[in-house]
Image: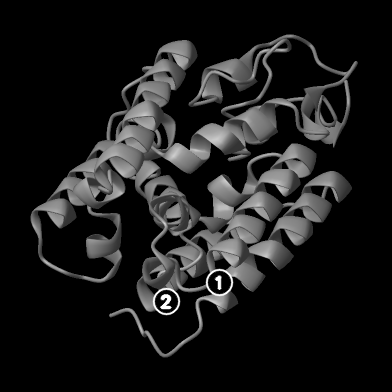
Amino acid sequence: MVFSQIPKAIGFIYALVMMGVIAYLWYSGRWRQKIAWLLLVISVALGFLIFSPVLPWQFQQLVLGDVEGLGGPLIIGVIGLAVFLLLTFVFGRFFCGYLCPVGTIQEIASHAPVPKVSLRPKKVFMGIRAVFFVLFLAMAFLFSASLLALFGIQDFFYLSVTAGTFVFIIILLLSMTLYRPFCRLICPYGVLLSLGAWKAAFKIHRTSACIECKKCEKACPTDEAKREDGKAECYLCGRCTDVCPVTGALGYKRGG
């Protein structure tokens, strides 16, 4: 279904613009869940229509040195991926949360009305993803092989019937019960963005209005809602702010 004649740069521009728009809406208090759903749907649609902005896949092709698969010169790929990494250092993981087709389709799946598996061992998940990141680099540099191809990312959005497609479908089914398994366990670009989010200038913080009811901690699917958490795995899904009973107790702002 992917239309090769439509420039993939459209997806890059969309993501670049929306990073700023989303950050402004969160900071100004104008963010609403209906806006979130609109962006989730648009991002998934872009994945099927132009396979962009699928930055994890583009990161894979960049490491492999595959100009054709990247869709442009390697230097452009380096600049593009670096821009979103720098933006994450400022605004947090809005790209993962609302703009990456791989992440957004898992986010939609997570809202399926089925029982949820409450596994939130943050450090364990990050450790597993670090192992995958080393494997990702080893396969690329030693064997010129694509790790992400095994998980069917491209095949799924291209509507191709392959073994990888079924692997990704299984991941989506798992996403209905376990929050974002691909993002939290496998995604190599997510490793870099988590570092950016950990040191991001703007994050969700508790204010002096917080009554320590801990409803946000129970609602957070990645165990990043505690006061001392670094927010490296915060996808700014809004579950914490939705359940907070006190207006102004949680705020997306700079610093502490």
Residue pictured at 63% horizontal, 39% vertical:
236
x then y, percent, for residue 11: 55, 71
Q: Residue at x 47, y 51 (%)?
A: 59
What residue is shown at x 60% (from left), y 38% (from top)?
193
Q: Position of residue 205 (x, y in %)?
A: 79, 24
Percent from the top left, x then y, of residue 216?
63, 21
Label ID, residue 182: none
Viewer-nearest residue: 242 or 175:
175
Figure check: 12 above or below 85: below
The residue under label 2 is: 50
Question: What residue would you read off at disc 1?
Answer: 11
For numbered disc 1, what is the local secondary structure? helix
Quadrant into which the N terminus falls: bottom left
- The part of the image, by quadrant, that contains residue 4 is bottom left
Q: Is residue 239 visible?
A: no
Task: Tell me which numbered mark, 1 or 2, is placed earlier along the sequence.
Answer: 1
Residue 141 is left or right of residue 227, and the answer is left
Residue 123: percent from left, percent from top: 48, 12
Which residue is at the front of the view, 190 or 34?
190
Position of 247 with respect to 218 (left or right) is right
Q: Secondary structure at mark 2?
A: helix
Q: How is the image coloured?
A: one colour
At 74% from the left and 52% from the top, the residue drawn is: 31
Separation of marks 1 and 2 at Cα, in angstroms: 8 Å
Contact, mark 1 vs mark 2 (Cβ under 8 Å)? yes
- What amino acid does circle 1 point to? Gly
Number of labels in the image equals 2
Disc 2 marks a residue whose amino acid type is Ile
Closer to us: 124 or 85: 85
